[in-house]
Amino acid sequence: MRRTLTLARKEFIAMFRTPVAYLVIALFLTVASLWFFGVHQFLGRNVASLRAYFAVVPLLFVVLLPALTMRSWAEERSSGTAELLLTLPFSELQLVAGKFLGGFALVCVMLIPTLLVPLSVAPLGRFDPGPIIGQYLGTVLLAAAGLAVGQCASAVSRNQISAFLSAAALLMVLTAFHVVNAVVPLPPTVAATVNQISFLYHFSGFERGVIDSRAVIYFLVVVGASLGWTTHVLAMRRWR
């Protein structure tokens, strides 16, 4: 665990040595705020709810999270440093977990300024802290799943561009997979299965402030499966 945290700290610091981290944070805060106060017109609706603010988060993550993960393994591979990393006294799991935790820490830092939104609008109405806690929990879980999927895409990509595009495509499919039910008439059992695959379907409960244990488990399973596959890819590469 100690080695993993050391790697996570190095990855976190390395992200701020490039403009990507600053651009991602700036875009997230700007677009989410413009949507909430401009497009949604929160101040003119007289409704004490932050649901609209978090509603746009899944779509933003489709673009922003791949930008954070595209360099995690693809850059290491294109520059030849991936082989050097694999010769260090770290297991594949430690390397994968370290990079994941570094990106996850950056997302948590990115979310801290968003607390100004509920704090600034709190005097305008009675906000229930329960739904807000649920919305933030859902956002954190969604980010963790997106980062894990993005790192998986980066591990099998040859360069940052392909890593970004493949991760964005994967996240778009996973996020909006439930839309299939609106386009194709499916049997109830199949339709229910389609819904269970969708990020947005599981996030919708958190968006309403409802903490569903099934949704929590789903996102954790996605994280575990994606990081497990990334670890497998690196292990196969080490023993070639």
Image (cartoon, grey):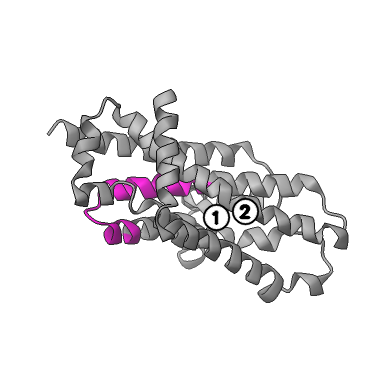
- Seen in the picture, residue 227 relative to 118 is either above or below; the reply is above
Where disc 2 sits, the SS reads helix
Q: Where is mark 1, residue-wise?
A: 200
Query: Residue at 54% of width from left, 58% of height from top?
Result: 58
Residue at the front extreme of this rendering: 17
- Mark 2 and mark 1 in contact? Answer it, CB < 8 Å: yes
Q: Amino acid at mark 2?
A: Ser
Query: Residue at 31% of width from left, 39% of height from top?
Result: 230
The main secondary structure of the magenta stretch is helix
Where disc 1 sits, the SS reads helix
Q: CA distance from mark 2 to mark 1?
A: 6 Å
Query: Residue at 47% of width from left, 52% of height from top?
Result: 194
Q: Position of residue 145 (x, y in %)?
A: 47, 45
The one of 38 and 175 positioned closer to us in this rendering: 38
Q: Where is mark 2, residue-wise?
A: 204
Q: Residues within 10 Å of mark 2 (few under 14, many from 20)?
A: some
In the picture, measured across the screen, residue 33 lies left or right of residue 158, that is right
Residue extent of the magenta highlight: 142-165
